[in-house]
Image (tube, rainbow, N blue to C red):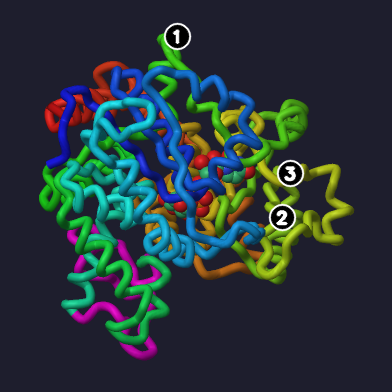
Amino acid sequence: MAEVAGEPHVLIFPFPAQGHVPTMLKLAELFLLAGLRITFINTERIHRRLLLNSPTLPPLARLPRFRFRTIPDGLPEDDRRASVPLQELEESIRTRSREPYRDLLAPAGRDPDEWPSVTCVVADGSLPLSWEVAEEVGIPVIFFRTSSACAFWAYYRIPDLIKGGEIPFPEEADWDEKVRGVPGMESFLRRRDLPSFCRNAKTTSDRGLQSVDNATASTRRARALILNTFESLEGPVLSHIRSAIPITYALGPLHLLVKTFENGGSFVTINSVRLSQEDRSCMTWLDSQPPRSVVYVSFGSVAVMSREELMEFWHGLVDSGERFLWVLRSDLVEGKTGEAVPAEAEGTRERGCIVGWAPQEEVLSHPAVGCFLTHSGWNSTLESVSAGVPMICWPCFADQQINSRFVSDVWRIGADMKDKCERSIVEKMVRDVMVRERAERLRTSAMEMAELARRSVAKGGSSYRDYWSLVEHIRAISS
Ligand code: UDX
């Protein structure tokens, strides 16, 4: 074991991407509140983005118990790609950043700030390096996953699905057939709801399948796990996870839990750090729209689509007759960067507002927003759940396929248009979720779920209690 100086010192190491860094910063903020000392690792590239977009960053550097540390990501300095494929980024970090990371875990005495040794690493389960090196040098690791519990559990069972012959799918498989090997989901999980790489795998040696199999093998060694979810939303799945990993903390929705403490007026502003510049003009536009009249459209930070798909969404939205606020990232359309609005968009300005990046949490809480057309990334899903906004789901990859199934068929707070991108379907879904009879039922369920989310993070709620149990756990393994 590394030398322990008695004081808990947590090192947090997120995967360098939008869906991960802001979420783990919220965890850092919560740990600081509990009096823990935090080192937060960013890649240099991500840290430059934080500095560029966050005027609040410099004051954070003066906090006595919090510091950022950076390591290279191993990619060439002049790599200007808007987004690097996630697997390429992971491999680059794993092979090139091992030594700089190991140095950061060096025992006290070699630390330039004279901080005590790291006593616990909160490792992002999507970034194997974060836990591999910690385990090598004997520092206890707690895993953090940015995905839902339902997606985590399905991933966890992938090796069993392979052993049971359910993956790879047989030739000409019926994608609507149920999957048997994920306990608790037998009655509704279909082949098409499994992570997208399962569809593409032709043999058990498929690269995507192998890499998940390897990551799962590591996760199965986890002694403790943190998930950004809450009991009233995913209690049954959490029970299954706890049968495999008994120490599993459900702290979500993290963005609401942070607010519980901010409302107490006692805290710092790590939560205000941004990776992208938000275009706030959409908030003024929303202010002038009637209540629940706007479809908010955003596909997260990574998903891409073809030009044809984009136009099907476009026509579907226009044909629905509803108003919309659309986040059109410059790299949303495959193979194109820098293109903002398609030419066909010009005639629809009066009913639509388009931005490159929105303050999403605020948008979803705005009374003018009536539904969310989303790629079903977990952060987006939880933000919509928390705001009581029904969803239309267009899942693109990985955990999103499972999240959308839960939204439509388990929680019943939205509709899943998985695999069918046609303007008539988009139009029908928008009408269903915004105005038709079904809309009222969905809205009521969504509002009820939002209330449960609020209760889970309030004093005495399940996430609030798990947070303090986690802090106790960290203190215990640090002493
Ligand atoms: C990815 C995966 O899709 C997700 O399921 C996984 O758990 C983490 O990595 P991403 O695709 O970016 O993340 O989606 P999501 O998890 O929904 O995160 C997007 C975040 O960006 C959300 O917190 C959202 O509020 C924010 N966002 C998005 C904005 O702040 N503004 C925008 O305009 C769009």
What's the CA distance linking mark 2 and mark 3? 10 Å
Residue 32 visible in the snapshot: yes
Q: Which residue appears at 36% of the width and 78% of the height?
A: 207
Would you name the residue on which mark 3 appears? 355
Mark nearer the viewer, 1 or 3: 1
Q: Is residue 212 above or below residue 227?
A: below
Magenta segment's dominant SS is loop
Q: Relative to 124, does residue 290 appear above or below in the rendering? A: above
Real-space Cα separation, disc 1 to disc 3, in angstroms: 32 Å
User: Whole-percent x and y of residue 322?
Assistant: 72, 46
Per the rendered image, the range of residues in magenta is: 165-193
Q: What residue sits right under mark 1 in the picture?
A: 265
The quadrant holding residue 141 is: top left
Residues at badges 1 and 3 in contact (C-beta under 8 Å)? no
Q: What is the quadrant of the C terminus in the image?
A: top left
Q: Is residue 60 left or right of residue 39?
A: right
Mark 2 sits on what residue?
330
- Is 168 covered by the magenta stretch? yes
- Is residue 159 in the magenta section? no
Classed neighbour count for the residue bearing mark 2: other residues with Cα under 10 Å, few (<14), some (14–19), many (≥20): some
Label 1 Cα neighbours within 10 Å, binned few <14 / some 14-19 / many ≥20: few
Ligand 1: does it lie within 8 Å of the C-beta at label 3? yes
The first of marks 1 and 2 along the sequence is 1
